[in-house]
Amino acid sequence: MLEEIKLIQPASVERDEYGMFQQPDLPDFDDDDVERCKAWVAQQGLQLVMRHLETDAPDEIVDRYFEAGEPHCDYWEPNNPEGDGWFCLAIHDTDDGPVCWWGRRK
């Protein structure tokens, strides 16, 4: 018997004290889990767009984040990709600063 796939759904974005968020049904992927992450995205039938604070936010927000020297970005509101159906999967910190993952069904 085939296992039924639970498709991830939009969730209310409630950011933590650092401005980070992870959709509750999003699996935890380690940095070296690229293939597992790609397989999950394909299984979910998702199109992904990543927004990086460094290229998505106005200069004053970028400067504020990188000059502060602490992982705090609750003042950044990532821009939605163009088109309908996008929902936030995660806002998390990386070595290059915060990134927002947007997803929608293909």
Image (spheres, rainbow, N blue to C red):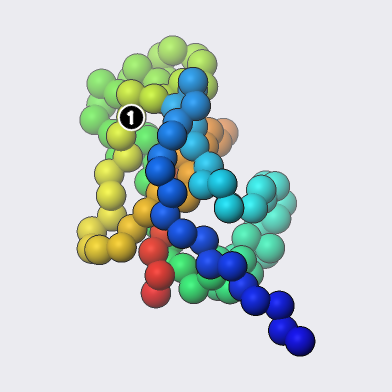
Task: Judge by depth and name the residue closer to the eye, 59 or 102.
Answer: 102
Report x, y in % for residue 16.
49, 27
Q: How many marks?
A: 1
Residue 87, above or below 39:
above
Report x, y in % for residue 89.
47, 50
Residue 31, above or below 17:
below
Q: Quadrant of the C terminus?
A: bottom left
Residue in the image at 71% along x and 78% along y: 3
Task: Judge by depth and name the residue closer to the eye, 97 or 19.
Answer: 19
Q: Is residue 35 visible?
A: yes
Residue in the image at 62% along x and 73% along y: 5
Q: Residue furthest right?
A: 1
Report x, y in % for residue 50.
42, 51
Q: Residue furthest bottom?
A: 1
Say what amino acid the circle numbered 1 marks.
Trp
Q: Is residue 62 visible?
A: no
Quadrant hosting residue 2:
bottom right
Q: Quadrant of the N terminus?
A: bottom right
Residue that label 1 marks: 76
Residue in the image at 51% along x and 47% along y: 23
Q: Mark 1 Cα within 10 Å, few/some/many (few <14, many 20+)?
A: some
Quadrant hosting residue 6:
bottom right
Residue 82, above or below 52:
below
Task: Judge by depth and name the residue closer to the eye, 46 or 15.
Answer: 15
| Left or right side of 6 for 31 | right
